[in-house]
Image: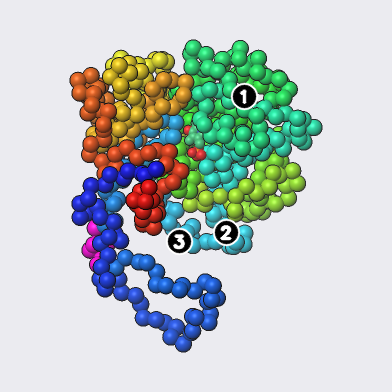
Amino acid sequence: MKIDLSIKNTAESKLIFEKSKPDKEGVFLPERQFANLDFSKLIPAELQRKEPGNLPEITEPELIRHFVNLSKKNFSVDTHFYPLGSCTMKYNPKIHEEIAALDGFSWIHPTQTEDQTQGILQVFYELGRALCELTWMSEFSLQPAAGAHGELCGMMLTRAYHESRGEGKRNLVLVPDSSHGTNPASAAQYGYQVVQILSDARGRVDLKALGEAMNDRVACLMLTNPNTLGLFESDILKIRELVHQKGALLYYDGANLNALLGAVRPGDMGFDIVHLNLHKTFTTPHGGGGPGAGPVGVTKALAPFLPKPVIVRKADGTYGWDHARPQSIGKIRSFFGNAGILIRAYVYIRMLGLEGLRRVSHDAVLNANYLRKKLSTAYVNPHNEYCMHEFVLSTSHLESKHIQAGDIGKRLLDYGIHAPTVHFPLVVKEALMIEPTETESKETLDTFVEVMLKILKEAEETPELVRTAPHTMPIGRPDEVQAARKPILSYRDYQRDQSQVVSS
Ligand SMILES: *Cc1c(COP(=O)(O)O)cnc(C)c1O
């Protein structure tokens, strides 16, 4: 199937290879420094290029304009308001970039010895300790590269724990129906059978359904709190009891920790394993498939199973790696994790301190409730009560106009606002999941409300305008499945795609 890029064919949007003309020059290569070396002998024959590289020939101004214009087509948290729920998309303070780029961090190599890397080891160690304090876990591994990777790590820890107690027969993982798709996927990926627990009318885990599902085959319950409806699972202590009574573990999906920093700790709620998404709560860059970080923390009982090596502070005050962990699940990532991302999160935590972090969550909850109050009468809110850092509206009342939640999201783009998460969580029909984060001003929030109400009016009066949005974007409505499964990321891919369209 063709992916419709619908890029308007202006000179500016022509692809760089299409602008290429033989003998145009935009760069001057340095004089060859090793005139006496014969590269045809130094480089193995099978690695030598047979034909010249297919590089565009273009002048410097054309090149600069090409990339600047491309960058202007981007929607990003640095250019637009991004009220995307569950995946906290907050502003990334630029000081993080400066510090992560310091020579001492950016020029070290993971194979350097401990005595040459004491600085970064200290950063890793202190970050791990800070995360322990914030979550009330005993120890953290910084290796996992994303939330989903942390979940997989958590499943491995769960099995290692049960097997060590002779309970390897536990083969079920419970997930609520409001859970993020990665939860059941991670459990299934590691060979667990997934059992869905229904929500009750209040949008919380149905205790009766949970009680009925609990038995001695259950390995763990995966839960995010607040859940993806932005509601605090107020029965969490009863949930803990139901789960622990049967010898199962409680896994905390930390993607929503932005609501609770410095207020409630997963450890206090009874969780045994925790993953955090540093690229959500702790303001490291997010999206585009780039590096993330999903550190995993555990209680004391599970610490022996953590991935190795584990960072330790030795008796003499220096830092090092502890490889002597006989019960460890092993390494789950090359080297020690995404160092640059971990540094950014560390800077964030050190700059704010506990009081600052508490304020972050306080303001995130305040901002979410401000929007909820302003929008929940015009739109449908099936769970209209005090929310945490996010809330979920529904556009089901626009069904008669043949308008879906996704259409509202597309129309928002025309007003310079990124779409909220649409059609998730699945427990709400036509869901619009809104998370403003703490970093947005009242003016931005008020503009958002104004635009949301304006779009609602358009939906009533000129539904076609909303149904066919966006009208101002370089890309309209790509086939989302194909765009994810078969992304066109190079000119070669693009040419191949075009030729397939012609031939089919
Ligand atoms: C984002 C998210 C995840 C997955 O995290 P990634 O870092 O994207 O892999 C899991 N659960 C919830 C609730 C999330 O919002």
- Which residue is depicted at the point 62% across and 28% down? 194
Q: Earlier in the sequence, mark 2 or mark 1?
A: 2
For the point 55% across and 18% down, the residue is 198
In this rendering, the label closer to the viewer, 1 or 3:
1
Q: Residues within 10 Å of mark 1 (few under 14, many from 20)?
A: some
Q: Amino acid at mark 1?
A: Val
Residue 436 is situated, as x and y percent measured from the top left of the image, at: 36, 30
Mark nearer the viewer, 2 or 1: 1
Three-letter amino acid code of the residue under disc 3: Asp
- Real-space Cα distance between discs 3 and 2? 14 Å
Front-lying residue, 276 or 396: 396
Could you tell me if residue 126 is visible in this image? no
Left or right relative to 397: residue 104: right
Q: Sort mark 2 into few (<14), some (14-19) or many (20+) by Cα contacts within 10 Å.
A: few
Q: Is residue 62 magenta?
A: yes
Q: Secondary structure at mark 3?
A: helix
Q: Quadrant of the N terminus?
A: top left
Q: Secondary structure at mark 1?
A: strand
* Outermost residue to the front: 503
Which numbered disc flags the more N-terminal residue, 3 or 2?
Answer: 3
Residue 9, horizontal then vertical, whole percent: 22, 50
**53 in the magenta segment:** no
Q: Are marks 1 and 3 in contact (CB under 8 Å)?
A: no
Do residues under tags 3 and 2 come within 8 Å of each other at their CB atoms? no
Which circle marks residue 195 in the picture?
1
Q: State the residue position of label 3.
A: 103
Residue 411 sits in which quadrant?
top left
Image coordinates of residue 151 in percent, x first then y, are: 58, 37
Question: What's the magenta region?
Answer: 58-65
Residue 477 figure quarter: top left
| Disc ID at residue 110 | 2
